[in-house]
């Protein structure tokens, strides 16, 4: 009886020893899932920060979204207090045409997005549009928020 117990223990050690050196047939996906969840959270936090940083109350309309392009679009923002921003930097109105002209020389596209607060008088928006045209940008897209009323009286959702 004693001898058979010794053989079993030796046989058991041998099996364990062989199993330690065999390749594992399973893929552990837990670390990959952890990394993907961390990346998802990073992109969820960073995505809202990728919009232009000038806070405006854009008017709502039923228009469809403009398709995106390869080159980052030039954005001009007109705030309620009359401040004009070219991308994220504030530009005095008397220097706007000169700055736009220098930017137009460096860019391939003449497309510009004009973001204007909904409370600004129409005449101020048209004056900035005239400055954009003088600066060499003749393809002006007015930026609005979707979901507003349409001319038919229904919401554009």
Image (tube, rainbow, N blue to C red):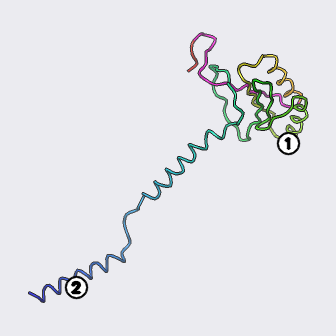
Which quarter of the rendering shows the C terminus?
top right
Q: Quadrant of residue 56?
A: top right
- Seen at 87% across and 26% down, the residue is 131
Left or right: where does residue 89 sit relative to residue 135?
A: left
Q: Which mark is residue 17?
A: none
**To which residue does mark 2 refer?**
10
Q: Secondary structure at mark 1?
A: helix
Is 41 displayed left or right of 111 in the figure?
Answer: left
| In the displayed structure image, the side of residue 136 where residue 114 appears, left or right | left
- Which residue is label 1 attached to? 106
Give the farthest residue toward the bottom.
Answer: 3
Residue at 70% over, 26% down: 143
Toward the viewer: 139 or 78?
78
Which is nearer the eye, 1 or 81?
A: 81
- Residue 10: x and y in percent read 22, 85
Main structural element of the magenta stretch: helix, strand or loop?
A: loop
Q: Residue furthest front?
A: 81
Disc 1/disc 2 C-alpha distance (Å): 79 Å
- Mark 2, secondary structure of its residue: helix
Residue 122 is a magenta residue: no
Give residue 98's quadrant in the image: top right
Please state the extent of the stretch shown in magenta in the rendering: 135-153
Location of residue 129 with respect to 149 vertically, above or below: below
How packed is label 2: few (under 14 Cα within 10 Å), some, or many (20 or more)? Answer: few
* Identity of the residue drawn at 56% across and 43% down: 44
- Quick check: 5 left or right of 103? left
- Seen in the picture, residue 41 relative to 122 is either above or below; the reply is below
């Amino acid at each position: 009886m004693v001898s058979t117990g010794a053989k079993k223990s030796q046989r058991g050690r041998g099996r364990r020893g062989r199993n330690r050196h065999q390749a594992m047939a399973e893929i552990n996906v837990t670390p990959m899932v952890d990394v993907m969840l961390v990346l998802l959270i990073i992109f969820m936090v960073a995505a809202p920060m990728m919009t232009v940083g000038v806070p405006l109350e854009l008017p709502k309309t039923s228009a469809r979204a403009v398709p995106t392009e390869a080159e980052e679009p030039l954005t001009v923002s007109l705030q309620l207090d009359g401040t004009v921003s070219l991308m994220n930097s504030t530009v005095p109105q008397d220097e706007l045409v000169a700055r736009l002209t220098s930017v137009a020389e460096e860019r391939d596209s003449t497309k510009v997005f004009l973001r204007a607060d909904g409370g600004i008088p129409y005449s101020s928006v048209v004056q900035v549009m005239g400055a954009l045209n003088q600066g060499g940008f003749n393809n002006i897209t007015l930026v609005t928020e979707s979901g507003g009323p349409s001319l038919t009286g229904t919401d554009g959702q």
